Image (cartoon, helix red, strand yellow):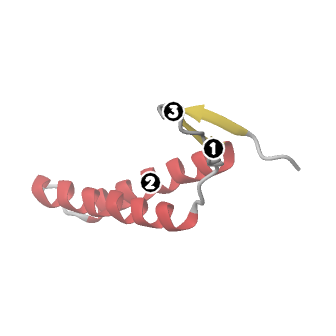
Amino acid sequence: MKTKLLYIWQDVVGLKDLLTSIFLSVTLTMVGFFLAPSNNQTLQLLLGLVGALLAFFINAKRIQPKRIIQKEVRGDSDK
């Protein structure tokens, strides 16, 4: 099966990886937010941010880059 790739913000991403990372980020952020007591907005914000950071690190480790970098050797035309 061929991987479907998308071009977003000058980068190439896999559709499956994009959707799973969005789902994981939203889920961990909301879990962190709802773990805090409803009368403590500061703790809700803090735990939501911790969930978002945790999701960022998990996604960064789990998803590999899709771009292909090719080096070109150019001759010195200045000399």
Secondary structure at badge 2 equals helix
Residue drawn where x is 49% and y is 61% of the image: 59
Q: Position of residue 6 (x, y in %)?
A: 65, 35
Name which of mark 1 and mark 2 comes first in the sequence. 2
Q: Amino acid at mark 2?
A: Ser
Dot 1 corresponds to which residue?
72
Dot 3 corresponds to which residue?
10
Q: Position of residue 71 (x, y in %)?
A: 62, 48
Q: Position of residue 69 (x, y in %)?
A: 62, 48
Name which of mark 1 and mark 3 comes first in the sequence. 3
17 vs 47, left or right, is right
Q: Amino acid at mark 3?
A: Gln
Name the one closer to the observer, 3 or 40. Answer: 3
Dot 2 corresponds to which residue?
25
State yes or no: discs 1 and 2 in contact (Cβ < 8 Å).
no
Give the total of numbered labels.
Answer: 3
Residue drawn where x is 48% and y is 35% of the image: 79
Foreground tag (2 vs 3)? 3
Name which of mark 2 and mark 3 comes first in the sequence. 3
Q: Position of residue 5 (x, y in %)?
A: 70, 39
Name the one closer to the observer, 63 or 32. Answer: 63
Figure check: 51 above or below 79: below
Q: Amino acid at mark 1?
A: Glu
Figure check: 61 above or below 52: below
Gap in Å between the C-alphas at discs 2 and 3? 21 Å
